[in-house]
Amino acid sequence: MRLHREGNTIMLTTGLVLLTVNLLADIYLFSDNTTAIALLAVASVILFVLVVQFFRIPNRLLTTGENQVIAPADGTIVVIEETEEGEYFKARRRQISIFMSPLNVHVNRNPVSGIVRYFKYYPGKYLVAWHPKSSTENERTTVVIESASGVQVLMRQIAGAVARRIIWYVKEGQPVEQGDEMGFIKFGSRVDIFLPLDSDVLVKIGDRTKGGVTVLADLK
């Protein structure tokens, strides 16, 4: 396991703030209360560990398949439905949505290999990730990757009520490899995938996914 570079500043800042709080409390508040000092230290360690684990990247054997769509994120399947995708395709598509809790690994990965045909970032609101309007009103990015066979897959990163920053590493015209890092969403969010209607969906509502490992669907 390793830690993601996006967490370097947050982890360092959190560590310094907690260390300062503990030193000041030891000197000015609890100088004669060893129990309070110990409890504060334990709480600080737990908080720091929680922040650090958010940026973890587990060692995994990634799944690859030319006609397979791989989960772009860790989380839970919360939506599988036919819907109108109105931003890029402007047509009916099969939507699969993954909710990422603050305890999930938050690296986002390319669901397929191919060329990035479309990318756009939208500033927006911070509704809870499962809100019906979060996919159209929250801060988000939209990425469309065209596979070697010509099939286009749309992936949307969506900020949630806690998430306050979306990171992406792709741009239009860029070739990408399935399973490589596409981006990162800090502190809880959601990812939507839009597939052709004839895709063979292999997951169901409530399934837990592993980014880069779980196969969401087979493309025709």
Image (spheres, rainbow, N blue to C red):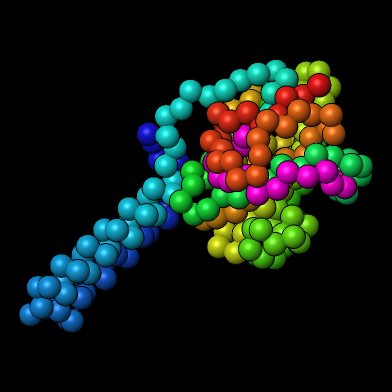
Q: Is residue 67 visible?
A: yes
Measured as percent of width and height from the top left, residue 209 is found at 56, 38
Tell me: 35 left or right of 178: left
Nearer to the camera, 74 or 165 = 74
Main SS class of the magenta portion in the image: strand
Q: Residue at x 70, y 62 (%)?
A: 131
Point out the stretch of residues depicted in magenta: 70-85
Q: Residue at x 42, y 42 (%)?
A: 56
- Against 8, is 41 above or below? below
| Quadrant placement of the C terminus | top right
Nearer to the camera, 42 or 145 = 42
Q: Is residue 123 visible?
A: no
Q: Residue at x 10, y 78 (%)?
A: 33
| Quadrant placement of the N terminus | top left
Q: Residue furthest right?
A: 91
- Against 33, is 66 above or below? above
